[in-house]
Image (cartoon, grey):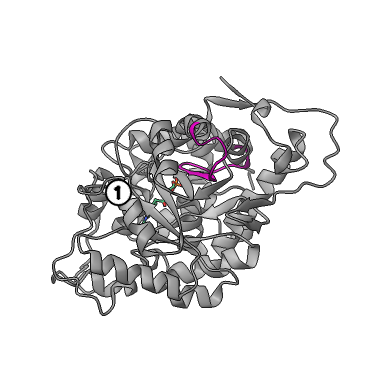
Amino acid sequence: MSQVTPLTRRSFARFLAGSPLLPLLGFSACAPGEPRDSTADATLRELSDLIGSPDDAINVFDFRDVARKTLPPAHYGYMATGVDGDETLRANRKGFGRFDLRARRLVDVSSVDTGVELLGERWDTPIVLAPAGSQKAFHPDGEMAAARASTALGHHQILSTVTTTSVEDLNAVRNRPVWYQLYPTSNWSVTQALLRRAEGAGCQALVLTVDLPVDSNRETLRRSVKADTRDCSTCHDAGPTGWFSRKPMFEGLDVQSIAFDTPWMTWDFIGRLRDETDMRILVKGIVRGDDALRCVQYGADGIVVSNHGGRAEASGRSSIESLPEVVAAVAGRVPVLVDGGFRRGTDILKALALGADSICIGRPYLWGMAAFGQAGVEKVLEILQAELQLAMQLHGVPSLADLDSSFVVSS
Ligand SMILES: Cc1cc2nc3c(=O)[nH]c(=O)nc-3n(C[C@H](O)[C@H](O)[C@H](O)COP(=O)(O)O)c2cc1C
């Protein structure tokens, strides 16, 4: 029997990558949304067998391949989409290439400490699960899979306003409550009701998302919806309250005429929230130093540097490149978190060296969830945590407290 050597396999892969046969095999040369990490090994991975269990995964991208295969096109499109031609989504990955790590030698790294403190609470890892809506579109367990996995491995989690699992149910399985992400609606009494639910469920902090005053142009999503030939009406009831019926945080609220667009929202809104709740308030979606300073001046307790994973404004600028000016403006007065394109332990190390207190991941844990439910989320978190620890050892960083800007240079 002839053996396929790595070389011939690679040549075959290259041949197929340029071949019109590829779509017939159920693969596209490039997944919608963000590109693969490295085009060289991507072709090989594309054509090799998809992983059959979380333990087969070598990096987090292995889960994306399974998620893409498993999910209906429209659901995968919702997860993958950026805006316009996905330029900002891609920029988030490319941005990490603008910073290089600068290793320190002959440091005792027999053990490493990845612990961080956030608003007075100690966490064993700086990797936080970002808020993402409608997770039952990816797996029947949805947010619960993320909650169980993150609790088992000691990660913090932020829950979306448009969660498909209630904050009460989620906090019941977590040893420490989630932070609750807020999309205020056009109706203040609905916002008040959401705050009461989050407070009642024990949430210590509110994460106000400010980067979507109006809907963004998600072309990859629109194309994937067109490509989805299923009858979606059983789940997506077209009535005025149909969408809300799958969003338990809105249960019992008058949602007939509310809108999520917030073009009216200005800095005073932080004060309004402050008067309404004792929860700490973080502002998510900041990409400029002057806005970060305003967050501090208006009484925010923390900042999340974010462009919504390339799903809000089509700026073309990565969030890692926005981080240094925010860190400089805030000058340690409040914690700074950052998200957007984190896929590697070295990405995390760069952000923390640039002054972030923690980082959030979105799509990677959703890939894991879509592929294998809770076990997939756990494995994604394990891979990223292991990569971070390895990067710390190889760059001479025994503890995240030892990390400073000397470990990173602009390239
Ligand atoms: C499917 C999906 C749904 C999201 N839903 C929300 C949301 O409800 N609220 C929010 O503030 N951000 C939301 N985000 C943005 C994430 O919180 C986060 O900023 C982004 O995913 C980070 O980038 P990454 O996916 O490249 O890691 C969503 C992102 C995705 C991919």
Q: Is residue 273 above or below residue 101?
A: below
Quadrant hosting residue 220: top left
> Which residue occupies the extreme top position in the image?
411
- Give the image location of residue 73, x and y in percent: 31, 56
Which quadrant would the C terminus be assigned to in this image? top right
Residue 207 vs residue 17, the one in the foreground: 207
- Give the image location of residue 44, x and y in percent: 53, 40
Q: Is residue 96 left or right of residue 230?
A: right
Q: How many marks?
A: 1
- Give the image location of residue 274, x and y in percent: 38, 57
Q: Is residue 284 above or below residue 54?
A: above
Is residue 33 at all visible to an observer of this figure?
A: yes
Q: Which residues are magenta?
A: 329-346
Q: Residue at x 35, y 58 (%)?
A: 273
Q: Give yes or no for residue 332 being in the magenta stretch.
A: yes
Q: Residue at x 57, y 54 (%)?
A: 119
Tell me which amino acid carries mark 1: Asp
Instruction: Count residues near mark 1 (Cα–Cα under 10 Å), then give few for <14, some for 14-19, many for 20+.
Output: few
Quadrant hosting residue 108: top right
Tell me the residue that label 1 is attached to: 268
User: For the residue labelled by badge 1, is the local secondary structure a helix, a strand or a loop?
Assistant: helix
Residue 5 vs residue 242, the one in the foreground: 242
Q: Give yes or no for residue 1 being in the magenta stretch.
A: no
Is residue 140 at all visible to an observer of this figure?
A: no
Q: Residue at x 56, y 26 (%)?
A: 99
- Give the image location of residue 171, x and y in percent: 51, 73
